[in-house]
Amino acid sequence: MTAVASIRRGLGGRGRISLLLAVVAVVFLVVLPYLGASRFMLHVAGLTFIWIVVASYWNLLNGYAGILSLGNLGFFALGAYISSVLAKELGISPWITIWIGAAATMAIVTVLVGLPVLRLRGIYIALLTLVFADALPSIVTILRTWTGGGTGLLGIPEFLPNLEKWQSYYITLGFAVVAMIVLYRIVHGTTGMVFVALRDSEDFAVALGVSRFRQGLKVFAISAFVTGLAGGFFAHTLGQISPGMLGIDQFLTVVAMWLLGGAGTFLGPILGAFVVTVGNEYLRVAGSLRLGLLGGLIVLTVLLFPGGIMQLVDRGVAIVTRLAGRTGPDGKDRPADATREGG
């Protein structure tokens, strides 16, 4: 059996549709700059790609592994600052510093957050991770000689000299595509099954020999590394960062991305990040009112559709599948008995 045949056999009808839609979406994004997209559109799209990665790997920790972390924005800022300072002060290429920043973020988070957090439960995990993120602005201020303090760090070396918007667009798109492929392999592989098992039935998983502590450190390391890498891409495409990236408005915005899209789902944070980022940018003319509008949208979604946007998508797929099941190969309605027998 060929590799293509194996993939087709492993994918159900919905899986093939999802794969086709994903390919179509990537092709469209690749050709978007050639379709007359403005500089502003490319800028917003680049931000969207980065926030998709941040929201998705935050969802890996919260939605899939069931570890209530509120500090992932700190992982993001840590990776951004480490990479930026190394590139600016030591003259190292950003293509190298982003990996150093991601690795340093992973090590710091695993030791300072992961080790103590995994000995706690419930709300105490959320509080400790939140304290970690809240402490970073003070550290940035103390290290103002390198970090720029409250005014931020300006003149950060970019990936390419005189980086154009279309270039940063493709750089962030490539990063997002690779990061999402890796995430898909994780959540649909053995590691993802272990995370979900610990989330849904920890006692049963432990009885089967799964180590909550070891798997918890693994998910913290994965989330911190990729989120720190996203911070590096953010810094070196924009050329500036500030402690404002750790503000409460940004925190709520990113949390809204995976909650609005659907926690514990693969596509949810992608859709949520797209809606929130694009909506947030185009609603800046509304000033502070935009956060109120965003909050209202989140409240309505949680009340009416607790599963987020993916709940709507699942309902739509279920309706289409039901209608397709009632239609025969010739396009005519199948008898009720035949429908029941076929599915």
Image (spheres, rainbow, N blue to C red):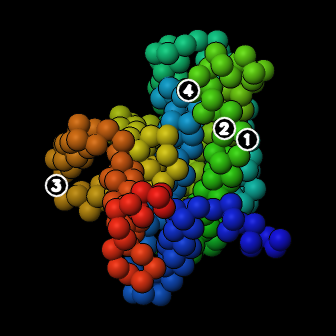
**Which kind of residue does numbered mark 2 sit on?**
Met
Q: Are marks 2 and 3 in contact (CB under 8 Å)?
A: no
Of pointers 2 and 4, the one earlier in the residue sequence = 2
Of pointers 4 and 3, the one earlier in the residue sequence = 4
Residue at the farthest right position? 1
Of pointers 2 and 3, the one earlier in the residue sequence = 2
Residue, disc 4: 200
Give residue 145's position: percent from left, percent from top.
58, 37
Residue, disc 3: 286
Q: Estimate how packed mark 4 is, as few (under 14), some (14 to 19) or many (20 or more) residues with alpha carbons within 10 Å.
A: some
Alpha carbon separation for disc pair 2 and 1: 5 Å
| Whether residue 159 is situated above or below residue 91 in the rendered picture | below
| Mark closer to the observer (2, 3) | 2
Q: Is disc 4 placed on a helix, strand or loop?
A: helix
Give residue 207's position: percent from left, percent from top.
72, 16
**Which kind of residue does numbered mark 3 sit on?**
Ala
Residue, disc 2: 193
Q: Are marks 2 and 1 in contact (CB under 8 Å)?
A: yes
